[in-house]
Image (tube, grey):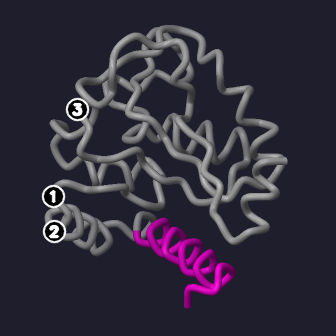
Amino acid sequence: RFIDVTQQNGIVATAKHFPGHGFVSGDTHKKLVYIKGEMKEVANYIPVIENNVLSIMVAHIAVADNDQYNTNDLPATCSKNIVTDLLKDSLGFRGIVITDAMNMGGVVSIDQCGLKAVKAGCDMLLMPVKEESDIKDILNEIQADEEFRKQVYTSVKKVIRLKICLGLL
């Protein structure tokens, strides 16, 4: 109901922090934290997706000891396993995927974190620290990789469509 009312009033509802923040210790503002083994909160996102939430924020949480969705010591925001394979493909989410703030300790120290988040499948970067470098990295990758170019263009189209629907363009 909250999602419906929010979105009916021209506000983009954003579910966060995918794949779940309730069973981790530590503060992602300061450092990378881990979900060990089973991701117990993923099922909570299914009804949210079914109720057409427009956006989901991915957390800077790593997943370890999980055969299918291990992030290899990267935050979920930079993991194709989490963003594309789980959120988009397995759960069928078609809305805007946004990162948590890219200035947080759980991600900021990772080299080319902006590019890695986009390559993982994120449509938008929230508060990038090295915005010009991120743009340069993404543009270089677009020129080098046709599939990546298509992915970025799809993300741009999703954002533009959303802005049109909200009357912002």
Relative to 93, residue 37 above or below: above
The structure residue drawn at horizontal position 15% and vertical position 58%, both measured from the top left corner, is: 130
- Dominant SS of magenta comes to helix
For the residue pair 2 and 161, the one nearer the viewer reads as 2
Q: Which mark is residue 105?
A: 3
The structure residue drawn at horizontal position 56% and vertical position 78%, both measured from the top left corner, is: 157
Start-end of magenta stretch: 149-169
Relative to 131, residue 69 above or below: above
x then y, percent, for residue 46: 77, 36
The kind of residue tagged 3 is: Gly
**Pointer 2 and pointer 3: residues touching (CB < 8 Å)?**
no
The quarter of the picture where residue 169 lies is: bottom right
**Residue denoted by label 1:** 130
**Pointer 2 and pointer 1: residues touching (CB < 8 Å)?**
yes
For the residue pair 36 and 4, the one nearer the viewer reads as 4
Instruction: Please say whether residue 167 is one of the residues in the magenta stretch.
Output: yes
The kind of residue tagged 2 is: Glu
Badge 2 density bin: few <14, some 14–19, many ≥20, Cα 10 Å:
few
131 sits to left or right of 3: left
The structure residue drawn at horizontal position 65% and vertical position 22%, both measured from the top left corner, is: 41
> Separation of disc 2 and disc 3 at Cα?
20 Å
Q: Which mark is residue 132?
A: 2
Q: How many marks?
A: 3
**Pointer 3 and pointer 1: residues touching (CB < 8 Å)?**
no
The kind of residue tagged 1 is: Lys
In this view, which residue lies farthest toward the bottom? 169
x then y, percent, for residue 107: 26, 37
First in sequence: mark 2 or mark 3? 3
> Separation of disc 3 and disc 1 at Cα?
14 Å
